[in-house]
Amino acid sequence: MDSLSSILKSVRLQGSVYFNACFASPWGLDLDQNQRAYFHLIIRGACYLQLGDKKEQLQGGDIIILPHGTAHQLFDDPSSVRVNATGVVPGLIDGINPFEGVGHSQDIDILCGYFNFNNSTPSYFLNALPDVIHLTQEHRTHFSFLDNALSFITQETKMKNLGREILIDRVTELLFVQIMRVYININGNEENIFSALSDRTLSEALQLMHTESDKNWTVESLAKAIGMSRSRFSEHFHNYIGETPMRYLHTCRMEVAKQKIEETESTLNIISEEVGYASDSAFKKAFKKFFGNTPSTFRQKNDK
């Protein structure tokens, strides 16, 4: 498994589409801060995105992703009234469109959806993403795999075929992976976690931490596994990831442990071994310090 696949598997990505609708001017949506990531695809037409005091125009073919669910507004014109989305989206999902035929000046076809992540443990990858990612028709043209995913999801939301819902969910999750591939490709020139995924040595180290977190890794053994000196690896890793290798590995182990507690009936002493702890007591202490609850308490809460 490559490093990006390992990271995205650990965040346990889910996604789906809220609606695919045509709005007639005037229209405006006010979207609150959300635990889910938003995405908006402008299929046809143009509109504005406002994020705080920053405003930018969106054109047909553009896709906007707000990885942290940041509050924002979408509207056809700065003078248009913006309606809170919580009172509009449920109707749109059911086919009730308050902006259908309201005016006559401009129509826009827009598809809105979400990505959901497991946010119980820190994700250095997700945390490093900006408040907004704006990919244009030019990006879609250059990266055909992204255009294919966007075209497919646009068409599927218009159909009433059997299995439509599950297919839309899966293609939406695929869409996030495709977006991340493009974002990494166009933002890989600086020292950050995105360029680390394209760096042979760091990518290999990240892959080992995510897929073999049970091993008794040290900075020295990780460095040796990827063919670097201990000091060079530590410096290189910290410069790109913004964290020490051992702290990053600790986060990986805690995420794996949490997932095993949630999804399996394995005993805690077995789980402690599976995430690289030599003793049950050391694992319980580390888990409680990380999550604020003991593994037993966490399992009891999860079973309710």
Image: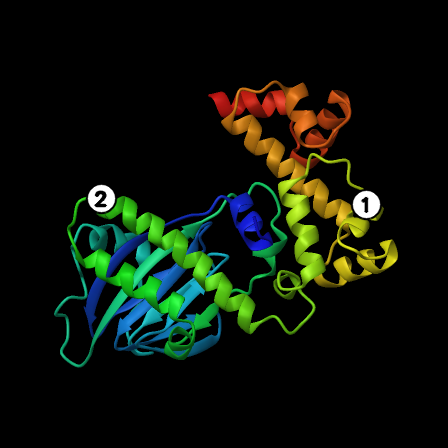
Tell me the element at label 2. loop
Q: Amino acid at mark 2?
A: Gly
Describe residue 113's horizontal placement relative to residue 299 as left or right. Answer: left
Residue 234: quarter of image: bottom right
Total labels drawn: 2
Vertical order, 242 against 259 (above or below)? below
Residue 56: quarter of image: bottom left
Vertical order, 202 against 164 (above or below)? below
Q: Which mark is residue 163?
A: 2
Mark 1 lies on residue = 221
Tell me the element at label 1. helix
Q: Residue at x 80, y 52 (%)?
A: 223
Of callouts 2 and 1, which one flags the residue occurring earlier in the amino acid sequence? Answer: 2
Protein image colouring: rainbow
* Nearer the observer, 267 or 4: 4
Describe residue 66's horizontal placement relative to residue 284 as left or right. Answer: left
